[in-house]
Image: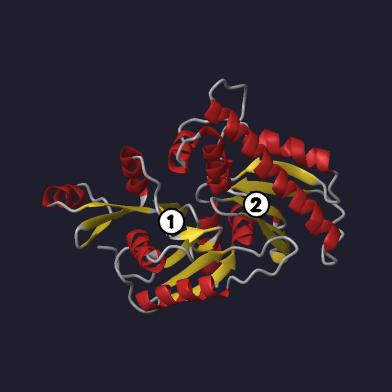
Amino acid sequence: MRNTTKEVIGLDIGTSRIVAARRENDGYGFEAQLNAFVTIPYSRITENVMTKESVPHCVNGAEITVFGNEAARIADLLNVETRRPMTRGVLNPGEPQSLAQIRRLLTSVLGEAPKQGHKVCFTVPAPGVGSEENITYHETMIRQILRDFGYEVRSLNEGLAVIYGELEDSNYTGVGISFGGGLCNVALAYMSVPVLSFSTPKGGDFIDSSAAAVTGELANRVRLVKEDGFSLNGHYSEKIHQALNVYYDDMMQSVVNGLKEAFEASRNVPKLGKKIPLVLSGGSALPAGFRDRFEKLIQEASLPVQFSEIRLASDPLYATAKGALVAALAD
């Protein structure tokens, strides 16, 4: 049982993972689940084991739906793809169970329904660079689910959340980038005020599906290989690692190109007169060598803004949720 004091929660609702952040003593605590599910045939023994091991699941007639972190491992054992409630940063229109599974995953990371007055701030993606994509349906449905749970709800741009979570020392001035599963979200803020934001469509899922297409592997299998110690340092003889290197470069170059286009197109970028920090976050930024490779691409791009540092977030997987929590606590 959670305590009955009013909670304030930051919530990163990403294509790949859903992460909840809370204050704990003098620091932060996080709970995360993979934003995916898989169905397996029902048996009483299997259901009992899932319950005993505290694996998030539900029973639907002749099937057991396993959702969250165990879904990828079970899908790999069965040699099938996981099903995804979200794609490219928003609810997946091709998945009939998207809303039902999102509701279950949110329950898993948030715990029991709160009393009135508990607050949650959740992240939403930015439109693609140079476009005005509509995220209204996605944002409205997530907001409604959280309100149904009893929360007071607000939303926050994902790139801005990275700035709030990581750039307090620069008075929230700088660039935050979240390299996520569905999208890469980018934001620039000046003294916490958002100046510009955009997203690019090549994220972790793009890397997985592209590498899978040229190697003949399942995308879920590629993702597991990618998360099992893959690095961008050195040379590899294995085809999957070669493909991952190629498409990581493609993803990073897409973000750098987006930054250049956004800076050139925006009339709102202030003349800062000084260098600003740039912080990298998200699960797709985790491989060793990522920061160095990205910095090299930034240096080659000759952007109109100079950076005092380019660094990884203190905890790249949880930076967005932490920033959402910072925003919620400031209200």
Where does the N terminus fall, quadrant-wise? bottom left
Which amino acid, by three-letter code, is at mark 1? Arg
Q: Is residue 253 left or right of residue 281?
A: right
Q: Looking at the picture, tell me which residue is in the foreground, 35 or 211.
A: 211
The residue labelled by disc 1 is 84
Q: Residue 252 appears in which quarter of the rendering?
A: top right
> Which residue corresponds to the image point at 47% horizontal and 40% vertical from the top-left?
223
Could one spot residue 204 in this view of the protein? yes
Q: Residue furthest left?
A: 44
Q: Element at badge 1?
A: loop
Front of the two marks 1 and 2: 1
Where does residue 206 sit, x and y in percent of width and height? 58, 47
Where does residue 100 sit, x and y in percent of width and height? 35, 67
Q: Is residue 317 left or right of residue 60?
A: right
Where does residue 231 sit, x and y in percent of width and height? 56, 30
Could one spot residue 282 in this view of the protein? no
Q: Looking at the picture, tell me which residue is in the foreground, 4 or 189.
A: 189
> Which residue corresponds to the image point at 58% horizontal and 42% vertical from the top-left?
285
Which amino acid, by three-letter code, is at mark 2? Ile
Which callout, 1 or 2, points at the residue further toward the start of the chain? 1
> Which residue corresponds to the image point at 45% horizontal and 40% vertical from the top-left?
218
Q: Height in image: 140 above or below 224? A: below
Q: Is residue 130 left or right of residue 51?
A: right
* Mark 1 surroundings within 10 Å by alpha-carbon count, few (fewer than 14), some (14 through 19), many (20 or more): many
* Mark 2 surroundings within 10 Å by alpha-carbon count, few (fewer than 14), some (14 through 19), many (20 or more): many
Where does residue 286 sit, x and y in percent of width and height? 55, 39
Q: Residue 245 appears in which quarter of the rendering?
A: top right
Q: Looking at the picture, tell me which residue is in the foreground, 169 or 325.
A: 325
Q: CA distance from mark 1 to mark 2?
A: 23 Å
**How did the renderer colour the structure?**
secondary structure
Per the rendering, the mark at residue 177 is 2
